[in-house]
Image (cartoon, coloured by chain):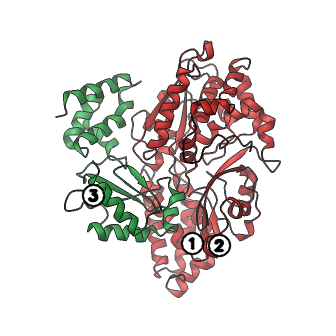
Chain colours: A green, B red
Amino acid sequence: MIPETLKTSLQARVASAITAREAAVDVMKELQAHYGWLTDEAVQEAAALLGLSPLQVEELATFYEMIYRRPVGKKVIHVCDSISCWCADCDKIIQYLKDKLGVGLGGTTADGMFTLVPCCCMGMCGDSPAMSVGGVPYGRLTPELVDEILEAERHKP
Amino acid sequence: MDLPLFRHNRPNRVVTFDEYREEGGFEGLKKAFSGMSPNDVQQAVLDSGLRGRGGAGFATGRKWSFVPRDLPGPRWLICNCDEMEPGTYKDRVLLEHNPYSLIEGMTLACYALGVRHAFIFIRKGYEKAAANLARGIEEAKKAGLLGEHILGSEHSIELDLHLSAGRYICGEETALINALEGKRPNPRSKPPFPAVKGLWQGPTVVNNVETLANVPAIVANGAAWFKGLALNPEGAGSKLFCVSGSVKNRACIELPIGTTLGDIIDGACGGMRDGKKFKACIPGGASTQFLKPEHWNLPMDYDTVVKAGSRLGSGGIIVFDEGHCLVEATLNLINFFARESCGWCTPCREGLPYVKEILTRIENGRGEEDDITILREHVKYLNYTFCALAPGAMAPLDGLLRDFEDEVREHIVKKKCPLK
């Protein structure tokens, strides 16, 4: 169950939309921020708010890269493996992340802190190799910098 | 420097509303609202020779002219800021430095097209750009340059942001329209084209960020001025080039259309990195064909690059040196497209993973001579799709087979990647 305040603000968002389902991505994002991922319960709640069937929400939720339909760590690491990052040896950074976190791609660390997933071009090609941690972009990655970033992100709220 | 887009930029921060206005910002809007008809604005954009900066390079004024004038009901303008073409980061750099040219350009476009409500569709990850735009919209509204009764006129224009959740296909204009409507963002079949039936079945124009950001300067300074910015007679205006790969400075720079490839790499980018030799580049984002050393002096203009067998595309130049295996580079590109395919059309959904499998085999020394033929067939077959994702994916593959067949064959004959 979502808190009444969140429900009210989401209802207001839906009411301000030209058609209710136009607000679908915003609603899914807010529910995801609340639960940590888009839970089955959240899909039901989104459907009720948007006047859609749960299946209609599901087909949206599974489409978007940044909507998570399964549990993820506290912060998701999206590491870019597109062409500009490939030119900047992103393979080594990805391997370093896997080794450091002790997970494969798609995996979540044992402490539930980080989930590691590859992603497509982040528009950081001028600063490749790049990744984002919990939505914060980082570029010109080296193993040392990755250590620093993860340490800082671990303690940031 | 009188190039229109980056002239307001400050190092490491966004230009302020007041600074933008002091430097001639919103002059185009004032000019239009004090004596130009919507048709005049549209004509200026048509005459300027401005072409879509998102990748397709279609003439902007012509696109606008396809919107029927007599249809009842609302019509829409959407700015496409779903910049996910690998190697492309120009719109991010532009909006992180200056949101106002886009806001002014969209207001002018709305005026020209009779649109009352426009959207900016922003990709996930561009939150900084979105925050700049949100602030800029409020500032423009307060100053009477946007919103109700712009500059005291009877025209009211509303600008809204749509923050997406990440998926390359959302940048395809009909998929983008579905996404904005809250539907699953598969592309729609065309016709009907968006100009006739787009967002909520109304006439809709979808333009790229850079395209719309050029409009204020065109209106303020005139079509002839804009055309004259290009270095070659066929071209018009400036272009944002964003360079990545094996260059010293990976820069996003504004240069006149018609600047040569060599001048971009040797000039603003400071030449090749670590004294490496230029082997090839992709000139306009992932869905364009390779250019080779013989194209060093090629003027970067839409028609000229097409004649050379590639496309100017988005201006995202990815530079490869002699140490890069282009089979592996193409495999990386195909991997991207295979992952981002929305799955709607069979050739794309099934074909791209198959192409990926073959290229993987070749790269790992398990390729066979037949594979080259099979790849060539796929370049043909993957054109049979609703949208341009699969045909775009085939562009670098087609280029690889056309320009670097020897390199592909060497993998097959030597049973290994010659560069590993």
The residue drawn where x is 58% and y is 29% is B196
Task: Name the spot of residue B137 as percent of width and height, x first.
Answer: 52, 28
Amino acid type assigned to the residue bearing label 3 in the image: Phe
Q: Which residue is mark 3?
A: A114
**Residues at marks 1 and 3, common chain?**
no
- Checking the image for residue B300, the label placed there is none
Measure the C-alpha gap from mark 1 to mark 3. 34 Å
Measure the C-alpha gap from mark 1 to mark 2. 9 Å
Residue occupying the far left of the picture:
A1
Task: Judge the density around disc 3: few (<14), some (14-19), many (≥20) Cα neighbours within 10 Å.
Answer: many
Tell me: A80 left or right of B172.
left
Label 1: element kind: helix
Amino acid type assigned to the residue bearing label 1 in the image: Leu
The residue drawn where x is 49% and y is 61% is A128
Task: Name the spot of residue B86 as percent of width and height, x first.
Answer: 52, 56
Q: Which residue is mark 2?
A: B279
- Frontmost of labels 3 and 2 is 3
Label 2: element kind: strand
Sequence-first disc among 1 and 2: 2
